Image (cartoon, rainbow, N blue to C red):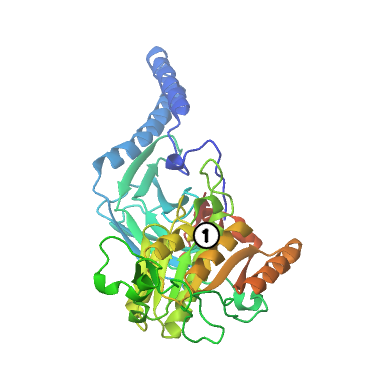
């Protein structure tokens, strides 16, 4: 993919031809000199120079006159490609005939609303649809990552053969499509070599043999301190008679253990101190969403219910066997964006405070945060809810990280955490617009700018 973008060129004018004002001024001066010679001398050479200059200036007027008429219609048609992240786009134009001698440029601008890097991908193509009432162009996009994409209205530029004047015309409407997240590689092979161990037996926790919770001492995790407004029938009067205060019983048997999927979207994992995306932010975010999609697929195949939490707004409940709910959850993963305060710790704290975690549930956290203190906090929260924790962490493939992986795997074994590494290739460090590419179709030569 070619990227001839200059750092000083804004996205709005990227790839657009422009009017050559200096050249027009020079041609106007030459026409004036030629007309002066015609009046003064009337020689054949003066007439020839004046005629040629006048014809060039007349052609330069056509682009502005054509674009001022409007009426150009555009229909954008999408076709699924043969592989993931591949899309065929056909642009069908109608409503206006292009006069001869004019050169047409079609410019597309694609934005990924879910990406950390907001720079767009600009596509341009030149065509000569002279006197055609209907004409079309086709191109293929490859390497599109997870996200919600938006096409802005296409810009059709017409220019004269000498490139002196450019006329612009916008056609069509903004079109939106979504690319669902895809799992990254075979991360099962990178799973820590530990079995799913039960959490250590603590007061009020689940027994090592998987039996009933031990609530013989203290209030236990099946009850909580009484709050104003709790129904009287839920008060544990036996605990009150023993002098342990008023406790409200939790009806845990009303719900069954489920898979709770949390997508860690904490902004500091993907953005720097100035809220600018890191260069590898899009690749890491796509990998986290892909890990969450893999867990979603596993839950659907295992016929178990799932709860999805991805930041402050993305929340979905997926009943067992409900394929429509699975697709809706995948759409939420595709639209997820990093934000401050949208991390997994904040999500779990909110769930625990609202008593929305059923004991015995499997908590799957897809995160790019590598800080050990955050992992320890996740273990603390999951233990307090008497659940199991699984961490799925994208990691760049590098021999220097082998010692780091072994250290974290030992920590996971000690704390009863199932840890999975997701290998990321070096090209994933690029922004989404750098990883995407455009392919030629039907002989149309497209150029990509990012």
Give the camera-side residue of 153 and 254. Answer: 254
Q: Position of residue 315 (x, y in %)?
A: 37, 65
In the rendered image, which quarter contains the N terminus? Answer: bottom right
Q: Residue at x 59, y 76 (%)?
A: 200
Residue 234 in sight: yes
Q: Position of residue 320 (x, y in %)?
A: 37, 82
Give the camera-side residue of 291 and 227. Answer: 227
Q: Position of residue 32 (x, y in %)?
A: 40, 18
Judged from this view, the residue extending furthest toward the top is 40
Q: Position of residue 97 (x, y in %)?
A: 28, 51
Q: Residue at x 53, y 40 (%)?
A: 274
Instruction: Choose top left, top right, bottom left or bottom right for residue 219.
Output: bottom left
Is residue 236 toward the left or the right of residue 337 in the image?
Answer: left
Residue, disc 1: 285
Residue 139 in sight: no
Few, some or many residues within 10 Å of mark 1 (<14, 14–19, 20+): many
Is residue 323 toward the left or the right of residue 277 in the image?
Answer: left
Instruction: Choose top left, top right, bottom left or bottom right for residue 244.
Output: bottom left
Q: Residue at x 57, y 69 (%)?
A: 392
Question: What is the number of callouts on the image?
Answer: 1
Q: Secondary structure at mark 1?
A: helix
In the rendered image, the vertical position of residue 209 relative to residue 158, given as above or below: below
């Amino acid at each position: 993919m070619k990227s001839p973008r200059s750092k000083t060129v804004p996205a709005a004018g990227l790839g657009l031809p422009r009017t050559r004002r200096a050249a027009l001024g020079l041609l106007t001066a030459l026409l004036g000199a030629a007309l002066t010679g015609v009046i003064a001398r009337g020689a054949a050479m003066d007439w020839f120079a004046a005629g040629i200059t006048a014809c060039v200036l007349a052609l330069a007027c056509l682009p502005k006159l054509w674009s001022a008429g409007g009426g150009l219609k555009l229909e954008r048609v999408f076709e699924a490609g043969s592989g993931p992240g591949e899309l065929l786009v056909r642009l069908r134009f109608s409503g206006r005939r292009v006069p001869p001698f004019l050169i047409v440029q079609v410019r597309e601008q694609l934005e990924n609303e879910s990406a950390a890097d907001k720079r767009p991908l600009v596509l341009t193509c030149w065509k000569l649809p002279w006197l055609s009432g209907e004409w079309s162009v086709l191109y293929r996009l490859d390497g599109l990552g997870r996200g919600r994409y938006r096409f802005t209205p296409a810009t059709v530029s017409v220019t004269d053969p000498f490139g002196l004047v450019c006329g612009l015309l916008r056609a069509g409407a903004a079109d939106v499509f979504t690319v669902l997240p895809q799992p990254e590689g075979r991360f099962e092979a990178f799973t820590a070599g530990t079995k799913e161990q039960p959490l250590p037996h603590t007061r009020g926790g689940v027994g090592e043999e998987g039996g009933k919770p031990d609530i013989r001492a203290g209030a236990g995790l099946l009850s909580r301190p009484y709050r104003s407004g709790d129904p009287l029938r839920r008060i544990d009067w036996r605990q009150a008679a023993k002098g342990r205060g008023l406790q409200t019983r939790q009806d845990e048997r009303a719900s069954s253990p489920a898979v709770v999927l949390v997508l860690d979207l904490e902004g500091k994992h993907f953005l720097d101190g100035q809220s600018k995306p890191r260069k590898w932010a899009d690749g890491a975010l796509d990998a986290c969403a892909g890990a969450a999609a893999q867990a979603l697929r596993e839950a659907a195949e295992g016929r178990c219910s799932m709860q999805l939490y991805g930041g402050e707004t993305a929340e979905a409940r997926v009943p067992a066997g409900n394929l429509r709910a699975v697709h809706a959850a995948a759409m939420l993963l595709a639209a997820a964006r990093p934000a401050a305060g949208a991390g997994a710790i904040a999500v779990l704290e909110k769930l625990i405070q609202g008593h929305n975690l059923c004991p015995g549930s499997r908590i799957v956290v897809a995160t790019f945060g590598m800080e050990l203190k955050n992992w320890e906090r996740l273990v603390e929260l999951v233990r307090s809810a008497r659940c199991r924790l699984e961490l799925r962490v994208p990691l760049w493939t590098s021999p220097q990280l082998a010692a780091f992986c072994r250290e974290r795997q030992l920590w996971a074994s000690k704390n009863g955490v199932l840890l999975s590494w997701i290998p990321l290739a070096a090209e994933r460090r690029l922004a989404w617009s750098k990883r995407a590419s455009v392919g030629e179709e039907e002989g149309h030569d497209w150029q990509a700018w990012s």
